[in-house]
Image (cartoon, rainbow, N blue to C red):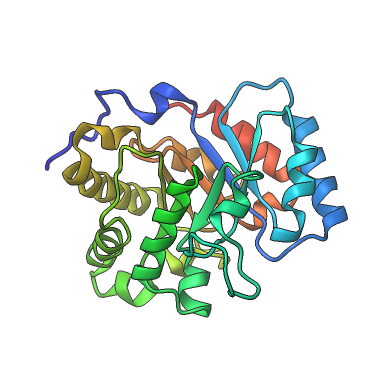
Amino acid sequence: MELEKSKQRLTYDDITMGLIVGNWKMNTTVTSAIMLANAVKVQIEGQFGPEVVVCPPYVSLYSVSETLRGSRISVGAQNMHSETNNGAFTGEISAEMLAQICQYVIVGHSERRTYFSETDLFINLKLLAALSAGITPILCVGEKREDRDSGRAHDIVSSQLDANLNGMDLDSKIVVAYEPVWAIGTGQSASPEIAQDMMFHIREILADLVGNQSEAIPLLYGGSVNEDNIGVYVSQADIDGALVGGASLNAGAFCRLIANASRTER
């Protein structure tokens, strides 16, 4: 299905000013996570801007959620298991356990795919479990450097989306984050043109699945996003926000990033 690059129907930006998600990864203790969450809350309090989500480690989820209670900041988990029933899965966390604390959960991050050998089928089951529990999943997709250099980037992301979204009712709320693997934590971010090209491709795939409703699915860019470059990304027609890694660990830098995203016009 061919889409016009200028948004004409009800889009995610018609509903909200975008979405900024901070992925804290394996950083912070419970004490420092509370301090970071509180600092972000205080600095953006009363400001008008994008929806903000922070994703601390499991051990800090409850404390951070309590710290942010009543604020404009939502809480997300960095991962979850696909099992929907309680059982003998030592060390794992289910969507049901997260549902009382989190509004969002990151699924399919490249670090999970790479370091923990998570397959597209496993990721698909996680997405279904998250939606069943009432949690909005943030699905991460993206190509490796060799895929980009060989001209296979679109094919790789198409394959991931087809497998990850298999059997899913996309009337449910979902977020898709494009994170080129070669840009995550490397300081080598994709150009705005590369990011927009992939986002338009993702929007086309979603449109084939759900038609015009695809415009209401937020698309985030991730990969060495910071306060200096956020503006050029969210100014692109099909980029609704960002999944932020290292830059979300400093309250001042993260809040400036949020402010810069707020001031950017398409």
Q: Is residue 179 visible?
A: no
Question: Relative to residue 230, is residue 123 depicted above or below?
Answer: below
What percent of the width, then of the height, locates residue 254?
68, 43
Residue drawn 73% across the image and 27% down it: 70
Q: Nearer the viewer, residue 238 or 163?
A: 163
Question: Relative to residue 148, is residue 256 depicted above or below?
Answer: above
Dividing the picture into quadrants, the one containing residue 126 is bottom left
Q: Is residue 232 visible?
A: yes
What percent of the width, then of the height, locates residue 257?
63, 40
Residue at the far left: name it: 1
What percent of the width, then of the height, locates residue 58?
69, 59
Q: Quadrant of the C terminus?
A: top left
What percent of the width, then of the height, locates residue 8?
24, 23
Q: Nearer the viewer, residue 156 or 78?
A: 78
Residue drawn 27% across the image and 28% down it: 7
Q: How many numbered marks, from 0 up?
A: 0
Question: Relative to residue 249, is residue 92 depicted above or below?
Answer: below
Residue drawn 41% across the image and 27% down it: 13
Q: Nearer the viewer, residue 29 or 248?
A: 29
Q: Quadrant of the N terminus?
A: top left
Residue drawn 55% across the image and 26% down it: 263
Question: Relative to residue 230, is residue 25 depicted above or below?
Answer: below
User: Does 55 sit left or right of 110 as displayed?
Assistant: right
Q: Nearer the viewer, residue 118 or 19?
A: 118
